[in-house]
Amino acid sequence: MKEVLQYKFLDNTVQAYLYVLGTVLLVLFIKRLISKYIAGQLLGMISKQKKAPKKEAFLSLVVRPIESFLIAFISITALDRLDFPESFKFKVFHITTEYIANAIGVIIIVIVFIRLCIRIIEFIAQILEEKANFSKDKSENQLIVFFKDFFKVILIIIGFLLILSLAFNKDISNLLTGLSIVGAAIALATKESLENLIASFIIFFDKPFIMGDLVKVQNFTGVIEKIGLRSTRIRTENKTYISVPNKQMVDSIVDNVTLRTERKVELRLELGLSTSAAQLKQLIPAIKKLLEYKLDIVNSYVFLMDTGKNAHIIAVDYFTVMPQNIDAFIALREEINLSIIEILEAANIDLAAKNMDVVVTNK
């Protein structure tokens, strides 16, 4: 039996292969148990609230990445105990296959580790979003989404540097020094992207608008759906989805409709010239009285704006309360318009267009 265990195959004994195989099989057998235990400990450190839905959400995010990391790390560590077979050693473009194999193993470990860290960040973001939902300040939600994406980018950069350092034996300090020079050149080449990135920070801290706000910008009107690192996504009134660079959102005049204290309605009544002064004196107070009894109207103005050879023009301006549902606003406008038409009919007042006759003569 000892002779069989000490038998060498590809420069390693059968016993060494069995140790590696046993280690890998053991990890495959208990990976779920270890992963759930580690996930539970992480959950305890991150969140003090251990409600069932939260725990299940966290486990669904991190258990598989932990399993992948355990399998990759322990399997590669176990395989590292074996001697690389001499028969497999050769060079590819002046690089040995042993070096390539070690580099691949390190790359796999770094990738699964960074993936695990990203999943943990996603769970932390979920917890913070749940807490932010109970707050009236909705700007917290957009900050969470922003920094979640920001830290993901940072982790990817860290993973890339770890691969260069551990897999390819590159000196990161010298690399960072070199990158600072290259970075200056890249900064000049990607000036607009950096301006948009800086503008995104200005938006988050200055808060001219937040997600969910209705805004008017550059001839577009729509709801802010997402504020990213480079651009702001807006769902327009036509239900199209547009992306506006953050720099333009900062430099342009943005009308935040959601923050309006009142919403103005302008109505111009062009009355026929046959309307007498007495009728006008009765009409204006009647419209004023109509608007005064509407609870959603906070202020109103009704007056004879102009008169001329074509019509008498009465201006009807009123302001509605905010925030107000758009459907309720449209219904209110319709109700007032119909009421004004009824007042005109009761007073036998015709609109100017009704009195216009078109005469065609033949010469």
Image: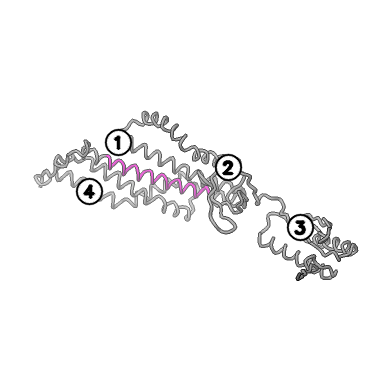
The CA distance from mark 4 to mark 2 is 56 Å
Pick the front one: 298 or 287: 287
Provide the residue span drawn in magenta. 103-129
The amino acid type of the residue labelled 3 equals Ile
The amino acid type of the residue labelled 4 equals Gly
The 10 Å Cα crowd at callout 3, few under 14, some 14 to 19, many 20 or more, is some
In this figure, which residue is indicated by the disc labeled 2?
A: 203
In this figure, which residue is indicated by the disc labeled 1?
A: 168
Residue 51, horizontal then vertical, whole percent: 49, 53
Q: Is residue 125 located in the magenta-colored stretch of the structure?
A: yes
Q: Is residue 327 left or right of residue 189?
A: right
| Residue found at x 83% / y 60% | 309
Mark 3 falls on what kind of element?
A: strand
Mark 1 falls on what kind of element?
A: loop
Mark 2 falls on what kind of element?
A: helix
The CA distance from mark 3 to mark 4 is 79 Å
Residue 159, horizontal then vertical, whole percent: 37, 40
The amino acid type of the residue labelled 2 equals Ile
Q: Tell me, yes or no, whether the two marked residues, 3 and 1, touch with CB atoms within 8 Å.
A: no
| Residue found at x 49% / y 37% | 191
In this figure, which residue is indicated by the disc labeled 3?
A: 297
The CA distance from mark 1 to mark 2 is 40 Å
Quarter of the view holding residue 74 = top left
The 10 Å Cα crowd at callout 4, few under 14, some 14 to 19, many 20 or more, is few
Q: Is residue 181 located in the magenta-colored stretch of the structure?
A: no
Q: Which label sits in the foreground, 1 or 4?
A: 1
**Mark 3 / mark 2, whichever is N-terminal:** 2
**Mark 4 / mark 2, whichever is N-terminal:** 4
**Mark 1 / mark 2, whichever is N-terminal:** 1
**Mark 3 / mark 4, whichever is N-terminal:** 4
